[in-house]
Image (tube, rainbow, N blue to C red):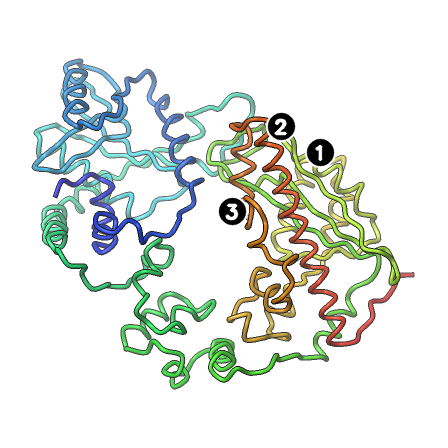
Amino acid sequence: MNLSKSKYCLGVTCKKKLWLETNKPEVKEEENGQVLLNGTLVGEYARNLLGKSVTIPFNKDLNEMINDTKKYLQEDNIVICEASFNYNHNFCSVDLLKKEKDSYIIYEVKSSTSIHDIYLDDITYQYYILKNLGYNVIKTCLVLLNPFYVRHGEIDVKKLFKIKDVTDTVLEKVKEIDKNIQDINLYMENKEEPKSELSKNCKDCPYFAYCTKDLDSNNVFKVRYMQMRKMLDLYNKGVTSFPDLLKEPINPKFKQQIEFTLYDKEPYINEYKLKEFLKTLHYPLYFLDFETYQVAIPNYDGVKPYMQIPFQYSLHYIESEDGELKHKEFLGEVGVDPRYSLAKRLVMDIPVDSCVMAYNMRFEKMVIRELASLYPDLSDKLLIIHDNIVDLMVPFKNREYYTKEMEGSYSIKAVLPALFPDDPSLNYHNLEDVHNGSEASSSFVELEKLSQEEQDKIRNSLLKYCSLDTYAMVKIWEKLKEVTKEKVKIRN
C-alpha cells in the first residue's frame, strides 16, 4: 500500500488498527479533538523556530507537494516546512527540513514535553525515505515543548521548544524499516478482518471496544483499576470471564467487583467508617468543583505548556443544620485570563471557617496551591480554603460504601447513578452540549470562535454542567447521612 508516516506509525504500533482505519473506520470511537488542535497550533509556532522558512501547501495530489519541494531544494540554504518526498510507495512530509549546501537536518515537531517510542519510529521512517532518495541527512532531531517555559509577553519560540538530537537512535532503528514495511504491506493484503492481537498499546485505543466485542460483557478488561499488563497476562492465559477470574489470585477489590456483579449482591455499607468520615465535617459546609483547561501553547503570562488553567467553579453550600441549600458560581470571560478574577471571587465566596468538600480533592487542592503561588495578595485566604478541604471520594475509594452498579469505580460519574438510578435531574446524559470535564474544557477553549448567540448557549451549558457536579456531591453527602443516620456537627 501507499504508506505515509502516520500510517507507518500506526502499523508499527498495531497493524490491526491500521487495517481498521483503512477498512472499517466507522467502528472507531470518538477521540479528543483538543489533542489535534494542540498539535496543529504547535506546528504553526515551530515554523519560526529555525528562522525564516517556506511552507509546502497541502495538496491532495501528493506529486504537487513533491514537485514544489524539489523546486525549493534547488536553493543552497533554506528551511522548508512540510517538505514532501516519496520512495517506493512510501511518502512523508517533514515538519522542518533544513538544507545547508548539500547536507540536510530533519526536525520532527511534537506537541509533547517528552520523547515517546513512536516519535522515534516516525522520524526514522522519514530518515529512511530521504536516505534512499540520495539526500545526505546528517542529523535528525525531535522538537518538543519545554515544560519549564513560562510565558512573559510574546511567545519566545527559542525557549518554548527544546531540540533533542536523536540521530544515534535513528541510525539503529533504520535497520528495522524494510522489514516493518514488508510486514505492514503483507498484513494489509488481508481481505478479511484479521484476528485482534491485544497489547499494552490497546489501553486508550479508539478501536478497543470493537476489538474486544466478542468477549463476555463482563470480562477482564472491565475490572476497574487493574493494570493493563495484568489484564493482558490473564487474557493471554485464556482467563477472560468473571467466573474464570474468581479462580485466580487477584486483589480483593477486584474480587469484590466481580462477586457483586455475578451474585447480584446487596450494597455493602460500613456504617462505622462512614460515621467516622461524617464526623470530620462541620457547618458551614461548601461543595466545590473546578473546571480547567490545558493548552500546549501558553495563552497568558505566567502560563506553562499544558498548565491547568481554572476557568470555572461551582459552589453549593449549607450554612447550618437547618439551613437551605444555596449556590454560587463563576465562569471566566471569553479571551481573558480567568485566574485572578476566579481566585478573588473564590475567597469572597467561601468564609474562612468553612468545611469545604471536593470529590477527588487532590485536583482542587492543586488548583488552589497554584493560584496561591501566583497571587500573594490572596495567598493566605486561598491556603485556608486549601487546608479545610475534605475528600468526599474517600469512602467510595476505600469501598466503605459499594454497590454492584458502581462496577468497581469510585468516580463520581459512576457513584452518582449507582446511588440515584431513577433521578433524571442527576443524569449527566440529560445535559446539553457539555456532559463531562473534557467537553467542558474544549468548549471553553473554543468559545472565541463562536458567535455571541452560540457563546451564550455554550456558557449556559457549562454552568449547568459544573453546577451538577457540586449538586451531585450534595446528594451523595445526604445519602451518607441517610444510611448512617449521622448528623453533621456545627462548629462553635
User: Relative to 486, is 111 on the left or the right?
Assistant: left
Rate crowding at label 2 as few (under 14), some (14 to 19) or many (20 or more) other CA atoms within 10 Å: few
Among numbered discs 3 and 1, the one appearing first in the sequence: 1
- Which residue is located at x 42 percent, y 41 percent? 33
Count up the numbered dots: 3
User: Relative to 79, is 488 on the left or the right?
Assistant: right
Cα separation, mark 2 vs mark 1, equals: 10 Å
Disc 2 + disc 1, Cβ < 8 Å: yes
Residue linked to disc 3: 438
Residue linked to disc 1: 341
Kindly state the secondary structure of the residue where label 1 is placed.
helix
Kindly state the secondary structure of the residue where label 2 is placed.
loop
Among numbered discs 3 and 2, the one appearing first in the sequence: 2
Among numbered discs 2 and 1, the one appearing first in the sequence: 2
Cα separation, mark 3 vs mark 2, equals: 20 Å
Q: Amino acid at mark 1?
A: Ser
Q: Amino acid at mark 3?
A: Ser
Kindly state the secondary structure of the residue where label 3 is placed.
helix
Rate crowding at label 3 as few (under 14), some (14 to 19) or many (20 or more) other CA atoms within 10 Å: some
User: Relative to 52, is 288 on the left or the right?
Assistant: right
User: Relative to 83, is 303 on the left or the right?
Assistant: right
Can you give x and y, in whole percent of width and height, for residue 215 in the image? Answer: 32, 71
Q: Amino acid at mark 2?
A: Val
